[in-house]
Image: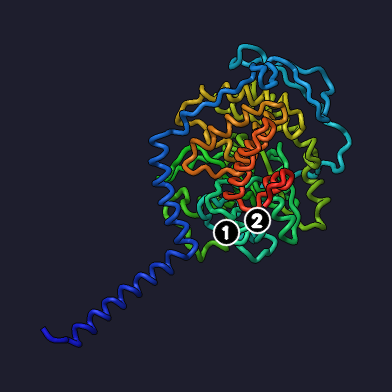
Amino acid sequence: MGYNPGMQNKRKKILGAIIAVVVLLAVVMSLPPVWSRITYHSRVAYRTVKYWLKPPSEAVFVPSANNDDFGATSVSAAVTTDTPTPQPTTEPTAIPSQFTPEATSLPTFTPTPTLTATPTQIPLPSSVLLTGILCERQFMNNCGPATLSMYLSFYDWGKNQLASGAVLRPNDKDVNVMPYELVDFVNEHTAQKALWRYGGDLQTIKVLLNAGFPVMIERGFEPYSLRDDGWVGHYNLVVGYDDERQTLTVQDSYLMSYPPWGGTIPVDQWDTFIGFDFYYSELEQTWRSFNNVIIVVYPPERESDVLNALGPLATEEEACRIAYDRAVQETTSLTEIRDKFFAWFNAGTSLVCLQDYETAASAFDTAFTIYPDISQDSRPYRILWYETGPYSAYYHSGRYQDVIKLADQTLGYMAEPVLEESYYWRALSYHELGDTIRAVDDLRTSLKYHPGFAPSVDMLKQLGKYP
């Protein structure tokens, strides 16, 4: 059969078309919104299989609270610490717990009168709405950078979640950004300032909104879309409230993709989208799981306005005392078992903030004792993805094996073990136990998942192992 130039040209055209299609697909897939969805669905598939084989909700951490080998103190005892801590102004009040064989004693605190700011006394209007937010639809696990980017758009930042995420989540497998990391980003990379506090409430949000400041909160979230995956942590930006309707108006980077009414919100409407309704009652329940944390971003020249709006939350120590007192009250007033777990967890978190580590460890012990009583399908098994208070409390109480055991369990039940904080605290505990090799390995692993993670860098330098 002889040479057929027509057939050869046809084959070249087909090959060229195939190459063009492949190149086009590669270009399209490389676009951040497209690549984000591809990686999202592939990771969801992998996670679904792994969690089916090894359900993380089955994992139960059993603290060694009464094991003298760990230098722990019984949860029934009032504990002291060698580090400077705020002292209670009254005798510790015993708080009975039906979940432990003994009563748990925790200190109570009286607010100090030496605040640098005073609460606003002006009567508030029944509704407020702040506008000018450029909405964004978050990439996978990127609600922190996306919500912060929306917040900064209120101050004409001119960038989006790609810019904030590049610093806050240099590894796109990272599942969480801590409030302090968001605040540090604002203070170090923008012209604005930011602060964060535990112990927020609805009134504080209203006062801040009336002063012209949107408020960022972290809360528990259980998506109702087809991708429902149980309890997760999630950031929202509060931009308004309406007392008559008993709702807040929030910008939600997740609901931008999956609005409650179905469908999608067209991109050309993002810059005029007012927000989603969020009922006051829902705020109280879901905000509790993160100790009512708030983040406020503001121009430097308006710092006094922010402090005045915060009132008793103006100082970090007083905010932690307020959060602690609320948590203690909720340990007895709440009836739902998961709410009680969060109340005890919040008590521990607030005590870590106050540097009362051993009493904090006792509170966390009680929380973990309650945890198995939560129905398996509603257990907040991701809690250590977002909050590291137990690590700090156990470490500073000399309970290094508990830190290691908790980190082992947390990392071992993840689809991808990417928590830099868990590796860091486990490394510190290995170091205290004299296992420098494992400590260095964990510190370097933490930097693999979060390049430049400052605590790990500092520790490696201290050990003479950096870079």
Q: Nearer the viewer, residue 250 or 257?
A: 257
Earlier-in-chain disc, 1 versus 2: 1
Which residue is pictured at 63% across the width and 31% down the height? 403
Residue 444 drawn above or below residue 284: below
On screen, residue 376 versus residue 213, left or right, reads left
Q: Nearer the viewer, residue 198 or 69?
A: 69
Residue 9, picture quadrant: bottom left
Q: Nearer the viewer, residue 49 or 89?
A: 49
Which residue is pictured at 67% across the width and 22% down the height? 70
Secondary structure beneath dot 1 equals loop
Q: Can you tell which mark lies on residue 317?
A: none
Q: Name which residue type carries label 1.
A: Cys
Residue, far left: 1
Q: Is residue 266 visible?
A: yes
| Percent of width and height locating residue 156 | 68, 64
Q: CA distance from mark 1 to mark 2?
A: 9 Å
Q: Can you tell which mark lies on residue 135?
A: 1
| Percent of width and height locating residue 126 | 68, 45
Disc 2 target residue:
151
On screen, residue 393 versus residue 115, left or right, reads left
